[in-house]
Image (cartoon, helix red, strand yellow):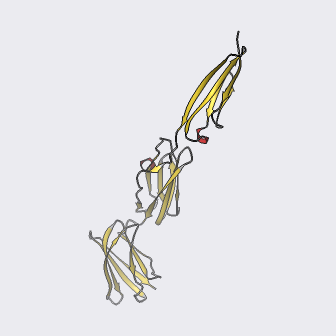
Amino acid sequence: ENRLKEVRYVNATSADSMTKDGDVYVISINAREIAAGTYESKVVAEDQDGKVSECVISFEVKENHAPVVKSAMENVIFTATSKSKQIDLSLYIEDEDGEALTYSASSSSESVVKTSISKSMLTLNSTGFGQTEITVTATDAMSKNVKVSFKVMVRDGSKPFDVYPNPVTDGKLYVRPGETENIDVQIVAASGSVVLDSSVAADPFAPAMIDMSAMLSGVYNVKVTSGSGKVFTQNIVKL
């Protein structure tokens, strides 16, 4: 009976090899450590009579592409604390190679919003009033990644507008609507005289700035009216 004398492996790179498990020979290729290209390795079997048989193994390592953002992520508005929203990140990020991506997320202010992720599903939980920026990172099997950010606002939805700060200390008063719209801002002094009457465009993430620097210190009544007829009044103190 003629038996094998030797089976050896001629590797194509430093990242492919062969091991033996009982009577089974296992060839391993670590594509992560191999540059893109086509390669040939070889298995050589020799029997007791010195006869040799060879088997050439061809394999290709394709170029890895980093994941990309296929669609911008929209800003999010919460109208109360202790609310949650889920976002499927696979709708916004894709991988050309079809690899499963690993996601992570961070909030610039966890006192406003906290994040958690399960597979591709991002969950936002509102924890306090304010604004934060969420940054999502998607990483492929080769550790290439892409980042995408969006803003989250948590405000009191029972009020149509936020008028702040109160008191005004640096001469700047801000008016934030619950949605993008044109607003009329009227400021009346304690004497009853109208010291400002202006129409401005405002957005929850780009509030209107009212310059009060030329106004005397004191108490003022601020009246905000939207194009849709919403009216809000608030007394503020200007220092």
Q: Position of residue 109 (x, y in %)?
A: 52, 63
- 154 lies left or right of 58: left
Say which of 100 and 215 sits in front.
Answer: 100
Depicted 58 relative to depicted 109: above or below: above
Depicted 127 relative to depicted 26: above or below: below
Q: Residue at x 56, y 45 (%)?
A: 142
Say which of 82 and 97 sits in front.
Answer: 97
Depicted 37 relative to depicted 120: above or below: above
Q: Where is residue 219 in the image (x, y as percent from the top left)?
A: 40, 85
Q: Residue at x 70, y 11 (%)?
A: 2
Identify the residue at the far top of this view: 1
Q: Where is residue 167 in the image (x, y as percent from the top left)?
A: 45, 81
| Quadrant of the rendered image containing residue 209 | bottom left
Specify the quadrant that holds the N terminus.
top right
- 2 lies left or right of 218: right
- 1 lies left or right of 178: right
Q: Residue at x 66, y 28 (%)?
A: 9
Q: Where is residue 193 in the image (x, y as percent from the top left)?
A: 31, 88
- Count the marks: how many? 0
| Quadrant of the rendered image containing residue 235 | bottom left
